[in-house]
């Protein structure tokens, strides 16, 4: 009986020690999920990070649907930047808050990306799908390579079709490809691209053949219209016996007329329109 009592008490003691352990294992630790802000979905346009210049793509409107497309575009932009020592940026915004998109693009480029002392310039494309507006802005150095007169319209025309079709990834790639093409031209020719300077050998040959052919036909037409020309056997047959016979001629001096006009003194002061008041190039529009 004493042994049974001892065993029973031992079991009670063992159960008393194991109960806290069993209770502890039933507790569940509460975990708070945190969302890390990325370059694809920032909270608002006002929360631009201080290190924005580290990013060549800042997609606030989430227009680049997949990470794979974003990686491919980023690789292309990075290659262009390293190849030409420039910055090529793509940014999308969700809301302009009443601000002009070109002014927003200029301010963002000037604040975060402008570094004219250390590179060959910067160009940025900004798109706001909520109002269907876009802008392209360049700093002074890039403006010398991609001019407002010729380079910017070429970039605009390259991406407009895809932008109007809401193919944003295609539009961003068109923009990057055209920037690369224009910078290649500048580095090869030593001057900005200008369609007036383009030379086509095929066009030159065609123009030459057309000019020769037109000239020959015009000459034959004139020959056919010359009814007063005919072949004769002797030179005296060209004489017109009934023509005027001048036997005497003289010149008589009558008078000289002199006109004097008072010449006003030139003024040293002059006016000049100068260059653009803005240091940023490019432009903007709707799609």
Image (tube, rainbow, N blue to C red):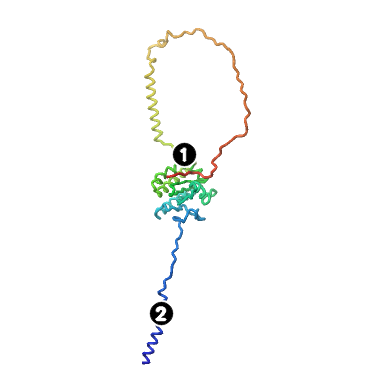
- Residue shown at the point (44%, 56%) measured from the top left: 41
Which mark, residue 19?
2
Residue 183 locus on image (x, y percent):
47, 45
- In this view, the mark in front (2 or 1): 2
Foreground pick, 235 / 228 = 228
Compared with 98, 31 (above or below) is: below
Disc 1 crowd rating (10 Å Cα; few below 14, some 14-19, many 20+) is: some
Location of residue 204 (image quadrant): top left
Residue 111 locus on image (x, y percent):
53, 51
Foreground pick, 102 / 259 = 102
Q: CA distance from mark 2 to mark 1?
A: 86 Å
SS category of the residue bearing label 1: loop
Location of residue 12 (image quadrant): bottom left
Check contact, mark 2 vs mark 1: CB within 8 A: no
SS category of the residue bearing label 2: helix
Residue corresponding to mark 1: 194
Which mark, residue 180?
none
Sooner in the amino-acid sequence: mark 2 or mark 1: 2
Residue 193 locus on image (x, y percent):
47, 40
Foreground pick, 22 / 155 = 22
């Amino acid at each position: 009986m004493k042994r049974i009592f001892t065993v029973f008490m031992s079991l009670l003691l063992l159960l008393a020690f194991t109960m806290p352990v069993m209770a502890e294992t039933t507790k569940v630790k509460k975990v708070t999920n945190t969302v890390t802000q990325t370059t694809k979905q920032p909270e608002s346009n006002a929360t631009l990070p201080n290190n924005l210049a580290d990013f060549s793509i800042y997609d606030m409107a989430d227009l680049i649907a997949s990470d794979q497309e974003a990686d491919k575009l980023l690789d292309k932009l990075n290659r262009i930047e390293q190849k030409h020592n420039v910055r090529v940026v793509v940014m999308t915004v969700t809301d302009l808050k009443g601000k002009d998109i070109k002014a927003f693009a200029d301010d963002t480029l000037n604040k975060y990306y402008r570094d004219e002392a250390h590179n060959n310039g910067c160009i940025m494309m900004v798109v706001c799908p909520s109002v269907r507006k876009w802008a392209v802005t360049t700093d002074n150095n890039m403006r010398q390579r991609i001019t407002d007169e010729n380079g910017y319209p070429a970039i605009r025309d390259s991406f407009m079709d895809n932008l109007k079709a809401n193919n944003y990834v295609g539009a961003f790639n068109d923009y990057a490809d055209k920037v690369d093409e224009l910078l290649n031209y500048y580095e090869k020719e030593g001057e900005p691209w200008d369609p007036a300077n383009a030379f086509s050998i095929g066009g030159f040959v065609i123009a030459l053949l057309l000019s020769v052919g037109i000239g020959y036909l015009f000459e034959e037409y004139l020959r056919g219209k010359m009814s007063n020309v005919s072949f004769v056997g002797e030179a005296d047959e060209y004489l017109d016996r009934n023509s005027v016979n001048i036997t005497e001629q003289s010149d008589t001096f009558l008078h000289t007329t002199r006109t004097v006009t008072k010449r006003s003194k030139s003024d040293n002061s002059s006016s000049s329109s100068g260059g653009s008041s803005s240091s940023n190039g490019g432009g903007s529009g709707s799609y």
